[in-house]
Protein backbone atom coordinates (compact mmCIF):
# COMPACT_ATOMS: atom_id res chain seq x y z
CA UNK A 1 0.00 0.00 0.00
CA UNK A 2 1.53 3.31 -1.05
CA UNK A 3 0.84 6.97 -0.48
CA UNK A 4 -1.37 9.07 -2.71
CA UNK A 5 0.20 9.55 -6.14
CA UNK A 6 -0.74 10.14 -9.75
CA UNK A 7 -1.30 7.35 -12.21
CA UNK A 8 1.67 6.89 -14.57
CA UNK A 9 1.61 4.79 -17.77
CA UNK A 10 -0.98 2.22 -18.84
CA UNK A 11 -3.38 4.81 -20.16
CA UNK A 12 -6.65 2.91 -20.80
CA UNK A 13 -8.23 6.07 -22.25
CA UNK A 14 -6.07 5.73 -25.37
CA UNK A 15 -7.51 2.34 -26.27
CA UNK A 16 -10.59 2.19 -28.52
CA UNK A 17 -13.90 1.66 -26.73
CA UNK A 18 -14.41 -2.03 -26.00
CA UNK A 19 -17.95 -1.83 -27.32
CA UNK A 20 -17.13 0.50 -30.23
CA UNK A 21 -19.73 2.47 -32.17
CA UNK A 22 -19.91 0.16 -35.22
CA UNK A 23 -20.09 -3.02 -33.11
CA UNK A 24 -22.75 -1.55 -30.84
CA UNK A 25 -24.82 -0.34 -33.79
CA UNK A 26 -24.61 -3.75 -35.47
CA UNK A 27 -25.52 -5.65 -32.31
CA UNK A 28 -28.36 -3.24 -31.52
CA UNK A 29 -29.75 -3.51 -35.06
CA UNK A 30 -29.66 -7.32 -35.15
CA UNK A 31 -30.96 -7.64 -31.58
CA UNK A 32 -33.96 -5.40 -32.22
CA UNK A 33 -34.79 -6.98 -35.58
CA UNK A 34 -33.93 -10.62 -34.98
CA UNK A 35 -34.05 -10.98 -31.21
CA UNK A 36 -31.48 -11.92 -28.60
CA UNK A 37 -31.08 -15.51 -29.83
CA UNK A 38 -29.96 -14.47 -33.30
CA UNK A 39 -27.79 -11.68 -31.95
CA UNK A 40 -25.96 -14.09 -29.64
CA UNK A 41 -24.79 -16.00 -32.72
CA UNK A 42 -22.89 -12.85 -33.70
CA UNK A 43 -20.92 -13.00 -30.49
CA UNK A 44 -18.73 -15.79 -31.83
CA UNK A 45 -17.31 -13.85 -34.81
CA UNK A 46 -16.98 -10.79 -32.57
CA UNK A 47 -14.99 -12.86 -30.09
CA UNK A 48 -12.82 -14.21 -32.91
CA UNK A 49 -12.22 -10.64 -34.14
CA UNK A 50 -11.03 -9.49 -30.72
CA UNK A 51 -8.77 -12.54 -30.39
CA UNK A 52 -7.20 -11.96 -33.80
CA UNK A 53 -7.10 -8.17 -34.09
CA UNK A 54 -6.93 -6.64 -30.62
CA UNK A 55 -3.51 -7.76 -29.37
CA UNK A 56 -3.22 -5.43 -26.33
CA UNK A 57 -6.62 -6.53 -25.03
CA UNK A 58 -5.80 -10.19 -25.66
CA UNK A 59 -2.52 -9.90 -23.75
CA UNK A 60 -4.17 -7.98 -20.90
CA UNK A 61 -6.84 -10.68 -20.64
CA UNK A 62 -4.24 -13.44 -20.53
CA UNK A 63 -2.21 -11.63 -17.85
CA UNK A 64 -5.29 -11.01 -15.70
CA UNK A 65 -6.60 -14.57 -16.05
CA UNK A 66 -3.23 -15.93 -14.99
CA UNK A 67 -3.64 -14.02 -11.74
CA UNK A 68 -7.26 -14.83 -11.02
CA UNK A 69 -7.19 -18.49 -12.15
CA UNK A 70 -3.85 -19.23 -10.51
CA UNK A 71 -2.46 -20.91 -13.64
CA UNK A 72 -1.35 -19.96 -17.17
CA UNK A 73 -4.37 -18.87 -19.21
CA UNK A 74 -5.16 -20.84 -22.33
CA UNK A 75 -6.55 -19.34 -25.53
CA UNK A 76 -9.98 -20.76 -24.77
CA UNK A 77 -9.88 -18.98 -21.38
CA UNK A 78 -9.23 -15.68 -23.14
CA UNK A 79 -12.00 -16.47 -25.65
CA UNK A 80 -14.44 -17.14 -22.81
CA UNK A 81 -13.41 -13.88 -21.16
CA UNK A 82 -14.05 -11.87 -24.34
CA UNK A 83 -17.28 -13.74 -25.09
CA UNK A 84 -18.58 -12.92 -21.61
CA UNK A 85 -17.82 -9.26 -22.23
CA UNK A 86 -19.57 -9.36 -25.61
CA UNK A 87 -22.61 -11.01 -23.99
CA UNK A 88 -23.02 -8.13 -21.55
CA UNK A 89 -22.68 -5.62 -24.42
CA UNK A 90 -25.52 -7.40 -26.24
CA UNK A 91 -27.68 -7.47 -23.13
CA UNK A 92 -27.17 -3.73 -22.76
CA UNK A 93 -29.52 -3.29 -25.73
CA UNK A 94 -32.38 -5.01 -23.88
CA UNK A 95 -31.61 -3.86 -20.34
CA UNK A 96 -31.37 -0.20 -21.29
CA UNK A 97 -34.49 -0.58 -23.38
CA UNK A 98 -36.35 -1.79 -20.29
CA UNK A 99 -37.00 -5.31 -21.64
CA UNK A 100 -36.37 -7.29 -18.45
CA UNK A 101 -38.83 -10.12 -19.10
CA UNK A 102 -36.29 -12.26 -20.91
CA UNK A 103 -33.86 -12.21 -17.96
CA UNK A 104 -33.63 -13.97 -14.64
CA UNK A 105 -32.12 -11.34 -12.34
CA UNK A 106 -31.57 -12.33 -8.73
CA UNK A 107 -31.41 -9.24 -6.51
CA UNK A 108 -29.55 -9.36 -3.21
CA UNK A 109 -29.24 -6.57 -0.66
CA UNK A 110 -32.19 -4.48 -1.83
CA UNK A 111 -33.01 -3.82 1.82
CA UNK A 112 -29.75 -1.87 2.07
CA UNK A 113 -30.96 0.58 -0.58
CA UNK A 114 -34.46 0.69 0.89
CA UNK A 115 -33.06 1.76 4.23
CA UNK A 116 -31.04 4.63 2.78
CA UNK A 117 -33.84 5.83 0.49
CA UNK A 118 -36.25 5.90 3.42
CA UNK A 119 -34.08 8.60 4.98
CA UNK A 120 -34.59 10.78 1.89
CA UNK A 121 -30.93 11.66 1.31
CA UNK A 122 -30.20 9.43 -1.67
CA UNK A 123 -27.14 7.20 -1.90
CA UNK A 124 -23.95 6.79 -3.90
CA UNK A 125 -23.82 3.52 -5.85
CA UNK A 126 -20.17 2.64 -6.43
CA UNK A 127 -19.69 0.05 -9.16
CA UNK A 128 -16.86 -1.26 -11.30
CA UNK A 129 -16.06 -2.76 -14.70
CA UNK A 130 -17.01 -6.13 -13.26
CA UNK A 131 -20.05 -7.62 -14.94
CA UNK A 132 -22.82 -5.33 -16.16
CA UNK A 133 -23.71 -2.06 -14.47
CA UNK A 134 -26.71 -1.99 -16.82
CA UNK A 135 -28.29 -4.70 -14.66
CA UNK A 136 -29.22 -1.81 -12.37
CA UNK A 137 -32.19 -1.38 -14.68
CA UNK A 138 -33.76 -4.22 -12.70
CA UNK A 139 -34.43 -1.60 -10.04
CA UNK A 140 -37.03 -0.09 -12.35
CA UNK A 141 -39.19 -3.17 -11.86
CA UNK A 142 -39.08 -3.18 -8.06
CA UNK A 143 -38.79 0.56 -7.40
CA UNK A 144 -40.05 2.54 -10.42
CA UNK A 145 -40.17 5.65 -8.24
CA UNK A 146 -36.39 5.61 -7.70
CA UNK A 147 -34.33 7.77 -10.01
CA UNK A 148 -30.86 6.53 -11.01
CA UNK A 149 -28.35 9.15 -12.19
CA UNK A 150 -25.25 7.71 -13.88
CA UNK A 151 -21.93 9.57 -13.82
CA UNK A 152 -20.39 8.97 -17.28
CA UNK A 153 -17.60 10.61 -19.27
CA UNK A 154 -19.42 11.46 -22.49
CA UNK A 155 -16.23 12.37 -24.36
CA UNK A 156 -14.59 8.99 -23.77
CA UNK A 157 -17.76 6.94 -24.25
CA UNK A 158 -19.48 8.39 -27.34
CA UNK A 159 -20.71 4.99 -28.55
CA UNK A 160 -22.35 4.18 -25.22
CA UNK A 161 -23.89 7.65 -25.05
CA UNK A 162 -25.26 7.29 -28.59
CA UNK A 163 -26.82 3.90 -27.90
CA UNK A 164 -28.16 5.07 -24.54
CA UNK A 165 -29.81 8.06 -26.19
CA UNK A 166 -31.43 5.79 -28.79
CA UNK A 167 -32.64 3.12 -26.34
CA UNK A 168 -33.50 5.17 -23.27
CA UNK A 169 -33.59 8.94 -23.91
CA UNK A 170 -34.90 9.67 -20.42
CA UNK A 171 -31.97 7.90 -18.77
CA UNK A 172 -29.58 9.59 -21.21
CA UNK A 173 -30.87 13.01 -20.17
CA UNK A 174 -30.15 12.18 -16.54
CA UNK A 175 -26.48 11.32 -17.15
CA UNK A 176 -24.06 13.43 -15.12
CA UNK A 177 -21.21 14.23 -17.51
CA UNK A 178 -17.88 13.32 -15.88
CA UNK A 179 -15.94 15.34 -18.47
CA UNK A 180 -17.01 18.54 -16.66
CA UNK A 181 -14.76 20.27 -14.15
CA UNK A 182 -14.66 18.78 -10.66
CA UNK A 183 -16.84 21.33 -8.83
CA UNK A 184 -19.58 21.03 -11.49
CA UNK A 185 -19.64 17.24 -11.13
CA UNK A 186 -19.84 17.42 -7.34
CA UNK A 187 -22.62 20.01 -7.49
CA UNK A 188 -24.64 17.89 -9.94
CA UNK A 189 -24.19 14.83 -7.72
CA UNK A 190 -25.26 16.77 -4.63
CA UNK A 191 -28.39 18.07 -6.35
CA UNK A 192 -29.32 14.55 -7.46
CA UNK A 193 -28.80 13.19 -3.94
CA UNK A 194 -30.92 16.00 -2.51
CA UNK A 195 -33.70 14.67 -4.78
CA UNK A 196 -33.22 11.24 -3.10
CA UNK A 197 -31.72 9.77 -6.28
CA UNK A 198 -29.17 6.99 -6.56
CA UNK A 199 -25.97 8.34 -8.11
CA UNK A 200 -24.08 5.53 -9.86
CA UNK A 201 -20.31 5.81 -10.40
CA UNK A 202 -17.69 3.34 -11.65
CA UNK A 203 -14.75 3.65 -9.25
CA UNK A 204 -12.17 1.03 -10.26
CA UNK A 205 -10.34 2.95 -13.03
CA UNK A 206 -8.14 6.00 -12.65
CA UNK A 207 -7.38 8.47 -15.39
CA UNK A 208 -3.77 9.51 -16.12
CA UNK A 209 -2.77 12.24 -13.69
CA UNK A 210 -5.63 11.43 -11.32
CA UNK A 211 -4.69 10.85 -7.65
CA UNK A 212 -4.62 7.18 -6.71
CA UNK A 213 -3.83 4.84 -3.85
CA UNK A 214 -1.92 1.64 -4.52
CA UNK A 215 -3.54 -1.35 -2.83
CA UNK A 216 -2.94 -5.11 -2.91
CA UNK A 217 -5.20 -6.68 -5.53
CA UNK A 218 -4.93 -10.24 -6.84
CA UNK A 219 -1.39 -10.61 -5.58
CA UNK A 220 0.17 -7.28 -6.62
CA UNK A 221 -0.30 -3.57 -5.93
CA UNK A 222 -2.80 -1.85 -8.22
CA UNK A 223 -3.75 1.82 -8.45
CA UNK A 224 -7.28 2.79 -7.44
CA UNK A 225 -8.69 6.31 -7.86
CA UNK A 226 -9.24 8.30 -4.67
CA UNK A 227 -11.49 11.06 -6.09
CA UNK A 228 -14.78 9.12 -5.64
CA UNK A 229 -14.00 8.51 -1.98
CA UNK A 230 -12.97 12.11 -1.44
CA UNK A 231 -16.26 13.26 -2.98
CA UNK A 232 -18.20 10.81 -0.79
CA UNK A 233 -16.49 12.23 2.31
CA UNK A 234 -17.33 15.79 1.29
CA UNK A 235 -20.97 14.97 0.48
CA UNK A 236 -21.41 12.84 3.58
CA UNK A 237 -23.89 10.53 1.86
CA UNK A 238 -24.22 6.73 2.16
CA UNK A 239 -22.09 4.56 -0.12
CA UNK A 240 -23.42 1.23 -1.39
CA UNK A 241 -21.36 -1.14 -3.56
CA UNK A 242 -23.21 -2.50 -6.60
CA UNK A 243 -22.28 -5.55 -8.68
CA UNK A 244 -24.22 -6.89 -11.69
CA UNK A 245 -22.65 -10.30 -12.31
CA UNK A 246 -23.37 -12.19 -15.53
CA UNK A 247 -23.91 -15.86 -14.73
CA UNK A 248 -24.40 -17.15 -18.28
CA UNK A 249 -27.45 -17.55 -20.47
CA UNK A 250 -30.03 -15.04 -19.29
CA UNK A 251 -29.00 -15.01 -15.62
CA UNK A 252 -27.62 -12.07 -13.64
CA UNK A 253 -26.96 -11.51 -9.96
CA UNK A 254 -27.53 -7.89 -8.90
CA UNK A 255 -25.84 -7.47 -5.53
CA UNK A 256 -25.87 -4.44 -3.23
CA UNK A 257 -23.42 -4.29 -0.32
CA UNK A 258 -23.59 -1.86 2.59
CA UNK A 259 -20.28 0.02 2.68
CA UNK A 260 -20.57 3.38 4.44
CA UNK A 261 -23.62 4.93 6.08
CA UNK A 262 -22.34 8.44 5.42
CA UNK A 263 -22.23 11.36 7.80
CA UNK A 264 -19.83 14.23 8.35
CA UNK A 265 -16.12 13.38 8.26
CA UNK A 266 -13.90 15.90 10.09
CA UNK A 267 -11.34 17.43 7.75
CA UNK A 268 -8.45 16.06 9.81
CA UNK A 269 -9.83 12.54 9.51
CA UNK A 270 -10.47 12.53 5.75
CA UNK A 271 -7.03 11.33 4.62
CA UNK A 272 -7.08 8.36 6.98
CA UNK A 273 -10.70 7.50 6.16
CA UNK A 274 -10.03 7.80 2.45
CA UNK A 275 -7.12 5.37 2.57
CA UNK A 276 -9.11 2.92 4.68
CA UNK A 277 -12.07 3.13 2.28
CA UNK A 278 -9.94 2.44 -0.81
CA UNK A 279 -8.29 -0.50 0.91
CA UNK A 280 -11.61 -2.00 1.99
CA UNK A 281 -13.06 -1.44 -1.48
CA UNK A 282 -10.12 -3.26 -3.12
CA UNK A 283 -10.73 -6.20 -0.78
CA UNK A 284 -14.44 -6.36 -1.58
CA UNK A 285 -13.81 -6.02 -5.32
CA UNK A 286 -11.24 -8.82 -5.18
CA UNK A 287 -13.74 -11.11 -3.45
CA UNK A 288 -16.30 -10.49 -6.20
CA UNK A 289 -13.72 -10.93 -8.97
CA UNK A 290 -12.70 -14.30 -7.56
CA UNK A 291 -16.37 -15.27 -7.47
CA UNK A 292 -16.94 -14.29 -11.13
CA UNK A 293 -13.48 -14.23 -12.78
CA UNK A 294 -14.66 -13.95 -16.40
CA UNK A 295 -16.73 -10.85 -15.55
CA UNK A 296 -13.68 -8.57 -15.22
CA UNK A 297 -13.70 -6.16 -18.18
CA UNK A 298 -10.61 -4.01 -17.69
CA UNK A 299 -8.80 -5.01 -20.89
CA UNK A 300 -5.60 -3.07 -20.24
CA UNK A 301 -2.52 -3.35 -18.03
CA UNK A 302 -4.35 -2.77 -14.76
CA UNK A 303 -1.27 -3.50 -12.62
CA UNK A 304 1.07 -1.57 -14.95
CA UNK A 305 3.51 -4.45 -15.11
CA UNK A 306 4.90 -3.06 -18.35
Image (spheres, rainbow, N blue to C red):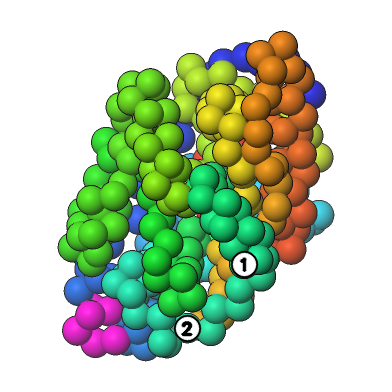
Mark 2 crowd level (few <14, some 14–19, many ≥20, 10 Å Cα): some
Which mark, residue 110? 1
Residue 61 in sight: no
Of all residues shown, which one is farthest toward the top?
268
Rendering coords of residue 102 (x, y %):
42, 87
Q: Nearer the viewer, residue 1 or 112?
A: 112
State the quadrant of the C terminus. Answer: top right
Q: Label 2 belongs to which residue? A: 103
Tell me which numbered mark, 2 or 1, is placed earlier along the sequence: 2
Q: Main secondary structure of the magenta part?
A: helix
**Mark 2 or 1: the one toward you:** 1
Position of 64 with respect to 194 (left or right) is right
Where does the N terminus fall, quadrant-wise? top right
In space, the residues marked 2 and 1 are separated at their CA atoms by 18 Å
Boundaries of the magenta span: 30-35
SS for callout 1: helix
Q: Position of residue 63 (x, y in %)?
A: 65, 46
How many labels, in total? 2
Q: Nearer the viewer, residue 202 or 188?
A: 188
Amino acid sequence: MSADRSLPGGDWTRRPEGGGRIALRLIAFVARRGGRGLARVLLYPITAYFLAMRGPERRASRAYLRRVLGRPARLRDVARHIHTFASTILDRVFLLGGDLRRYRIRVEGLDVLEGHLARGRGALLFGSHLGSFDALRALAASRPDVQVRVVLDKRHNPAIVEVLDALNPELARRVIDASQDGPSIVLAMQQALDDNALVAVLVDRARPGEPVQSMPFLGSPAAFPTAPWAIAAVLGRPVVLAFGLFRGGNRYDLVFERFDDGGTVPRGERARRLQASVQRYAQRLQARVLDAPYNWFNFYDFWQDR
